[in-house]
Image (cartoon, rainbow, N blue to C red):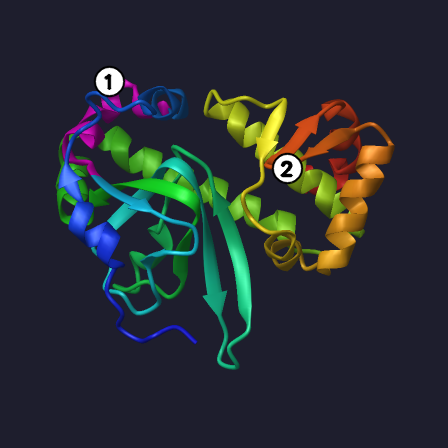
Amino acid sequence: MYAAHAPETRPATRNAHNTGCSGCAHAATCQAGGYGEATLSGLRDIVERVGLLRDGEYLYRPRTPFRALYAVQSGMAKTVAVDSSGREQVLAFHLPGELFALDAICLGHHDNAVIALGRTQFCRFPFDRLRCLTTTQPDVQWHLMHTMSRQIHQQRLSGGDYPAEERMAAFLTNLSDRRTLLGLRTDHLPLPMSRADIGNHLRLATETVSRLLARFRDARLIRVERQGIEVLNGKGLREIGRHLLQA
């Protein structure tokens, strides 16, 4: 179980500081995601850098007071919920440049945890400053609404009664599509999460995830590598997962 009212992890609190985006090696990713637009320039003025967090370290835990929105700067992270019996559910994986924690706005606290996958840095957007920013830059508010809408749509990938093969193909295709929007490589998909995490997210057994990856490999759709997969036939993967991707 997660500790109640636990603060942000020490690395996050200790290393959070105002840096803006000047000199950031990953600024191009955020620009591709829309943050480079003049109408969103205020976001660059309020951002703080958080980390470096190592694999398994928490950015925040359930019941942590809500004070900011976050985006992955480099690396990857996962959002995890836990039920009353202690069972975990992986709700989402976050790529560089993707904003998250919007679900905590209405509660005033986080009801889930965000955990680093490998060495990960984050950008922190203090919500009090962000709220003031929306009064002078209305497009910022639209951007937040658009982000929330996209995240709700992506939740469909782990829901519904779809065959395991379709879920897995749609998951990989969705990762590729998101990386395209962020200006990242799509022929190679880093998978720092465990097979168990992928299975948990897609409601599949770990063994099923491994079997499906092997099936896609044998069909020459992908090449399985140590740190992820190489996409050999993206159209083929999209065709397998088309019903779920269009849902």
Q: Residue at x 33, y 62 (%)?
A: 110
**Of residues 208 and 176, which is closer to you in this image?**
208
Mark 2 highlights which residue?
226
For this view, does 212 lie left or right of residue 7? right
For this view, does 154 lie left or right of residue 44? right
Task: Choose the circle earlier in sequence order: 1 or 2.
Answer: 1
Compute the Cα span from label 1 to label 2: 40 Å
* Visible residue check, residue 216: yes
Give the image location of residue 44, x and y in percent.
20, 28
Q: Quarter of the image containing the N terminus? A: bottom left
In the drawing, what numbered circle is on residue 38? 1
Image quadrant where residue 103 sits: bottom left
Q: Residue at x 65, y 52 (%)?
A: 195
Image mark count: 2
Name the kind of residue labelled 2 in the image. Arg
Is 39 magenta? The answer is: yes
Magenta part of the chain? 34-48
Is 170 magenta? The answer is: no
For this view, does 238 lie left or right of residue 180? right
Name the kind of residue labelled 1 in the image. Ala
Give the image location of residue 188, x and y in percent.
61, 26
**Of residues 88 and 103, which is closer to you in this image?**
88
Residue at far bottom of view: 85
Give the image location of residue 205, x and y in percent.
73, 61
Q: Is residue 155 above or below residue 24?
A: below
